Amino acid sequence: MFDPALFKLPGMRRLTVILALLAVVEGICIIIQAQFLSVAIVGLWHLKSLATILQPMLIFAIAWTGRQLLVVFKNWLMYPIVEKTSGKMRRQVMQKLYQLGPSYVAKTGTGNVVTTALEGIDKVQTYLMLVVIKVIDMMVIPWVILVYIAWLRWREALFLLAIFPLIILFMIILGYAAQAKADKQYVGYQRLSNHFVDTLRGLPTLKQLGLSKQYAHNVYQVSEGYRKQTMAVIKVAMLSTFALDFFTTLSIAVVAVFLGFGLINGTITLLPALVILVLSPDYFLPLRTFASDYHATLNGKNAFADVQKMLALPVPTDRDQLGEQPLAWQADSTLSLKQVDFSYDDQQPALKQLDLVAKGYQRIGIIGASGSGKSTLINLLGGFLSPMPGHGTIEVNGQPVSHLGQTAWQQSFFYIPQNPYLFHASLAENIAFYQPQAGLSAIGQAAEKAGLTAWIKTLPDGLNTQIGEGARGVSGGQAQRIALARAFLDDSRKILLFDEPTAHLDIETEAELKQTILPVFEHHLVFFATHRLHWINQMDYVLVMDHGAIVEQGTPAELAAHNGAYGHLRDEMVGAI
């Protein structure tokens, strides 16, 4: 339950020592409280005056108050560490996701990533806040109490010492069962998150195909599976809580019987017997408190393990082989890929034997059937994916690099996907994403070049209108124009990566957008992945892809005259239309 990785968190070792010392003090407060409460009760039993009871009751009240203040103080010490750790962990997760790129999100699922990065960190925070203090209390306080009970009467102490590991053993058995159920529940929760995200993304398509009601059954099955997994966890939690309460209560009853026989036989007086009886519930209390929160922290432990696993994933190194400043791409600059392979699972290549040379301000089209590897090639060119080590060479301006996830390279291109991401911010801030210092005048000029002026005039606050999630909706064509405005605003980035930017647009919108996109191509190296043939006539060079390989390349005229893979693909697309 107590993950050893917790001790590797900054400040946790020092805090653990402090909490252990405070637990000793709390144990002493519990003993003082039990001792003087017993003194007061015995005094009343012997019909002593209330004045003689006042002093032990006052000491009892002070010890009880000190015990409660120690609990508050321990939480006060723990909270800043937990808050700082969870905040740092959230930043590390976001940085790691940026370094891992879209391949990790595609492999694990968007819902899974969102669950880990957002709700997972919140669960980790709860886990840290609960488990550290309770585990230390369980490891320290019972021993302090047991030593004092042994000093009073060794027989009862020996029984309590023997029963404690038996109860823990029983807890471990039930804990493994709960852990297995909780693991399945957490996996089910991640699966539910992935289905939820996929459903939201595909809902318009499902409605158009008339499959929304049919898919609702799939959503019901996933939700029902998660409900059953949750109920299974609750059943085990209730069983373990009942068993723990039963055995601890039975143990206290056995101690009471032993003390009763001792009082009858005259081997123990009333005061130490009462002190031992009062201390017995507190001896088991840290264990019961830990057990009550055990199931509440299981998801936090799973989330913590997932976060640690994500942070331990290897990321591309040697990111400064081209320097740290943006690359100055010019008319004589070159990019060369020779015999490059890429694999998602390090086994089956998704891209194989890539041979490509890009020079200056070429317009390079990338075409192929769905699943041929167009988007994967764009992601490789953007440095979001790294080639298989030792499989081919990559050179930028004649300088070999191990991958294109270079700081200089990634600061030199625009990436325009099918669905550009719009932040919850103003329209001006979204356009100025790459140039946050840009003024409103420059932003307005970029918006005009991107064909947004007429639309902006209809907005209530113009460029200051809030867009993105939870704000004003934006159509697919408008989102692409905003992405183009980003390119118009920052003319220093001379490389453009388009990943089927018009795939989800209707023909009329695409035709209008094409007139806006074409001027952006001037004095830029362009990689344009598409399955729309009318773009090919605007390209200087074309790569034809099939099953992850470039099966043909050349100018559009050369490919058309050759009548090879390009000709067959063109005929298939025209036939489909």
Image (tube, helix red, strand yellow):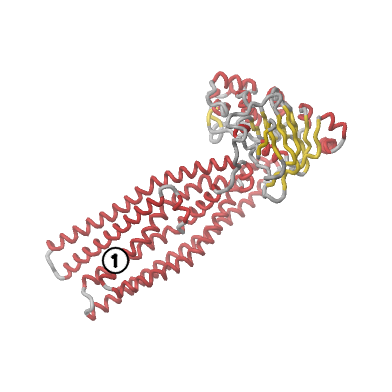
Residue in the image at 55% along x and 30% along y: 467
Does residue 429 sit above or below 257 in this rendering?
Answer: above
| Residue 539, x across and y down, in percent | 76, 28
Q: Quadrant of the C terminus?
A: top right
- Looking at the picture, which amino acid does disc 1 mark? Leu
Does residue 440 sit above or below 194 in this rendering?
Answer: above
| Residue 245, x across and y down, in percent | 39, 67
* Along the line of sight, the residue nearer the viewer: 506 or 391: 391
Location of mark 1 (residue): 279
Q: Quadrant of residue 399?
A: top right
Label 1 CA crowd tier, 10 Å (few <14, some 14–19, many 20+): many
Q: Quadrant of residue 428?
A: top right
On screen, residue 182 versus residue 415, left or right, reads left
On screen, residue 437 versus residue 352, left or right, reads left
Residue in the image at 62% along x and 20% along y: 448
Which element carries disc 1, helix, strand or loop? helix
Residue in the image at 57% along x and 51% along y: 190
* Along the line of sight, the residue nearer the viewer: 224 or 492: 492
Does residue 295 sit above or below 430 in this rendering?
Answer: below
> Outermost residue, bottom direction?
265
> Outermost residue, front direction?
399
